[in-house]
Amino acid sequence: MHALVVYESMFGNTRAIAEAIAKGMSTRAKVRVTDVVDAPAEVPPEVDVLVVGGPTHAFSMSREATRQDAARRGGAHTDVPAGIREWLRELPDGDHPQTFVAFDTRVDLPLVPGAAARSASRQARKRGFTVADPESFLVEGYEGPLADGELDRATAWGRRLGEQLEQDLRTKAAFRAAGDAR
Ligand SMILES: Cc1cc2nc3c(=O)[nH]c(=O)nc-3n(C[C@H](O)[C@H](O)[C@H](O)COP(=O)(O)O)c2cc1C
C-alpha cells in the first residue's frame, strides 16, 4: 500500500502531526510526506491513500488572507499563496480511485466550531474521492505547542488508519478476484 501525506503548516504543528501520522502508517504502507508547496499537481497513480492536513483558520481551511495573518504572527513554514484548499481545488477532474483522509490542527476550545479537516473532506467528496472519517489534533494557542499527548495520538491514529485501509484493500482485491473467477 502506498500513502501520500500532504500537509500545510504555518507554525510547524501540523507538520509534526503529519510526520507522526506517517510514522504510524509506515508499519502497513510505504509513506511519502510532503509540504503542500512541494506536492505533485496530480496524485501519482501508485498512491492508494491520500492523507491531507492543515491548520484550522477562521473555522475552515486557510485562505491567503488568513495565511498572511499567520505570517504576521510569525508563522513561516508554508508559502502564503498556496494551501491545501488551493491544492485540492487544482487537482485535475476525473476519477480519483484513492481513499481520502483529512486531518487538521485547531485550538483546544470546545466552543469554537469548524475544523479544516471537515471542509477538506467535503471538498474531496465533491471531487469524487472516497472519503474516510477526518480527525482533529489540538494545539494550545495559535502558534502551538501541541496539546499533551497529541503526537502519540497521531501516531496511533496513523497506525489504525493503515491497518483499516490495508484490510479494505484486501477485501476489494478479494471481491475483484472472485468476480474474475466467475
Ligand atoms: C488567522 C488564523 C485563524 C485561526 N482560526 C482558528 C479557528 O477558527 N479555529 C481554531 O480552532 N483555530 C484557529 N486558529 C489556530 C490555528 O488552528 C493554529 O494556528 C494551527 O493549528 C497551528 O498549526 P500550524 O502550526 O501547523 O500552523 C487560527 C490561526 C490563525 C493564524
Image (tube, rainbow, N blue to C red):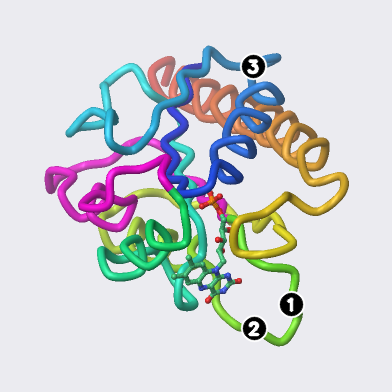
Pointer 1: residues within 10 angstroms few (<14), some, or many (20+)? few
From the top left corner, tell me how far across and down residue 23 is, in percent.
67, 21
- Pick whichever of labels 2 and 3 is earlier in the sequence: 3
Q: Name the residue that disc number 3 marks.
A: 26
Quarter of the figure that contains the C terminus = top left
User: In the figure, residue 142 lies in which quadrant?
Assistant: bottom right
Is residue 98 part of the magenta span, yes or no?
Answer: yes
Q: Distance between the Cα atoms at labels 2 and 1?
A: 6 Å
Mark 2 residue type: Val
Q: Nearer the viewer, residue 43 or 131?
A: 43
Q: Name the residue that disc number 2 marks.
A: 112
Pointer 3: residues within 10 angstroms few (<14), some, or many (20+)? some
State whether label 1 is within 8 Å of ligand 1.
yes
Q: Distance between the Cα atoms at labels 3 and 1?
A: 31 Å
User: In the figure, residue 12 lies in which quadrant?
Assistant: top right
State whether label 2 is within 8 Å of ligand 1.
yes
Mark 1 residue type: Leu
Pointer 2: residues within 10 angstroms few (<14), some, or many (20+)? few
Q: Residue at 23%, 54% (x, y): give it.
A: 86
Is residue 44 part of the magenta span, yes or no?
Answer: no
Q: Residue at 43%, 61% (x, y): give it.
A: 70
Kindly state the secondary structure of the residue where label 2 is placed.
loop
- Pick whichever of labels 3 and 1 is earlier in the sequence: 3
From the top left corner, tell me how far across and down residue 103 is, in percent.
56, 51
Q: Name the residue that disc number 1 marks.
A: 109
Q: Write down the region rendered in magenta.
A: 76-104
Q: Residue at 19%, 32% (x, y): give it.
A: 42
Is residue 74 depicted above or below 152 in this figure? below
Q: Are marks 2 and 1 in contact (CB under 8 Å)?
A: yes
From the top left corner, tell me how far across and down residue 159 is, in percent.
73, 29
In-image side of 75 versus 110 (left or right): left
Mark 3 residue type: Ser
